[in-house]
Image (cartoon, rainbow, N blue to C red):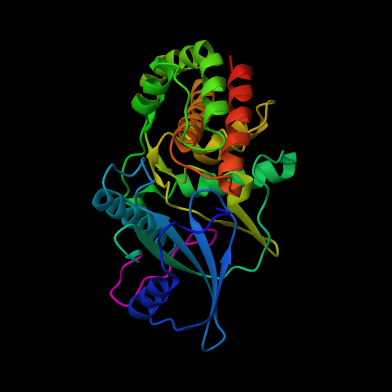
Amino acid sequence: MRDKPTGMREGDLRLALAEGWQIEPAALRYAPVGGGSYHWEVRDQAARRWFVTVDDLDDKPWLGTTRTAVLAGLRTAMEVAVALRHEAGLPFVAAPVPGTAGQAVRPVDARYAAAVFRFVDGPPGRFGAVLPARERAARVDLLAALHQSTRAARRAAASRIELPRRAELETILAGRQDPWRSGPYAEAARALLARARPLVTDRLAAFDRLADVAREAEPVITHGEPHPGNVLRAGPDRILVDWDTAGLGPPERDLWLVTGPDGREQARYARATGRPVNPELLGFYRLRWALDDLSAFAARLRGPHRRTADAERAWRNLQQTIRLLARLG
C-alpha cells in the first residue's frame, strides 16, 4: 500500500510492539510496498531488524464481515504459517514471530492489527511477471511440499469458493446510472463498469458453472497468492510471504499462478504428489482472481476517495482487469 492507514497513530503501533513483542523501536520506517497490508521496517534498540505488517480489519472480506471475525481469521491464518514453518519444517514459509503471550497477531487499535516478522534481506519478484520455465519448476516443487504438509495445518479454515464482494458488485452492475460523486475516479469507474456489464455478467455465469467442481475437489493447505510479488529471493532460497490468504482448498488455487501453457508444470506436480492437475480448476481460479479484483477495485472507487497513489492504482487496475476478463472468454 502506498498510502498509510487512515486514522492509525504510529504511537499506537509502537505501543503494540512494546507490549506484544517487547520490541522498542529505535527506527520505524513506513514501507510503501504490497497491495493488501501496510508495512513498516523496524530497527530495535539492539539493532535487530523486523518487518511489521498492519492489516485493516474492515478490509479483509475473505476472512469475515466483522472486525472480530476478521481478527480471528487473521490469527488462524498466521498460526497456520507458524505450524507450517516449525512443525512441518518448511523453510520457505515466512511465518510471524509469536508475541510474548504466544499470539501471532495483536490489535493495534479497534480497526488495525499487527504481526511481526524477522527481516528477510532479499528482493521480491514483480506481480504479473512471466517466470522462466526453470523458475516455474522450482515454485511447483515448493507448492508440492506445501500441499503435502496439510496435516500440520490442522487449524486452517476452508478457503472461500464464493466471491466475498459479489453482492456489492451485482448491486453496482444492476444499479441506476446516476453519476458517482465519491471521488476523482468515481464517475469514470462507473461509466466503465456500465459498458462492461454484459461482459462481467457473462463471466459471473461462467464462475457459477465451475464453482461446484471446486467444492467437490479434495482440499490441501494452500497459500492462496503465490505470485512472483510474494516470493523473496534470499541468496539461493525462495521465501513465500503474505500468509493471510492461507486456507484449505484445491491445489489449483495456487497452481494457476505458476503453471505454463505447455503442461510441463502440471506433469511435474503430478509426479511429485501423485495428484493430477485439473485444467478446469486452473481456469476457475484464474477467473475467480479477476472477478475478485474487479469487485475490490469497483468498491474502492465507488466509495469516498481522494487523488492518492492507491486510488490511482485502483483506477488503473480496474481498467486492466476488465481487459483481462475479456481475454478469459
Q: Tell me the quadrant of the picture where the C terminus can be found.
A: top right
Q: Position of residue 211 (x, y in %)?
A: 39, 21
Residue 54, percent from left and from top: 44, 61
Q: Is residue 93 magenta?
A: yes
Q: Is residue 219 above or below residue 154?
A: above
| Residue 85: quadrant of the picture | bottom left
Q: Nearer the viewer, residue 9 or 78?
A: 9
Point out the residue furthest to the bottom here. 46
Q: Which residues fall within the magenta stretch?
A: 88-104
Asked whether residue 88 is in view, the answer is no
Q: Residue 185, located in which quarter of the rendered image?
A: top right
Q: Residue at x 38, y 47 (%)?
A: 150
Residue drawn 37% across and 77% down? 15
**Which residue occupies 67% across, 51% down?**
125
Task: Work out whether 281 lies above or below 229.
Answer: above
Which residue is at 53% across, 13% downward? Answer: 199
Nearest the camera: 272 or 215?
Answer: 215
Q: In this image, 187 relative to 55: left or right?
A: right
Does the segment drawn in magenta span residue 326?
Answer: no
Q: Viewer-proximal residue, 130 or 222?
A: 130
8, above or below 175, in the image: below
Q: Is residue 200 above or below residue 235?
A: above
- Number of dots carrying numbers: 0
Query: Is residue 215 in view from this perspective?
Result: yes
- Give the image quarter of residue 235: bottom right
Residue 279 screen position, x and y as percent: 54, 22
Q: With 322 as the anchor, is 205 left or right in this view?
A: left
Where residue 294 sits in the image (x, y, percent)? 51, 29
Which one is nearer the viewer's eye here, 156 or 67? Answer: 67
Q: Of helix, strand and loop, which mostly describes the magenta segment?
A: loop
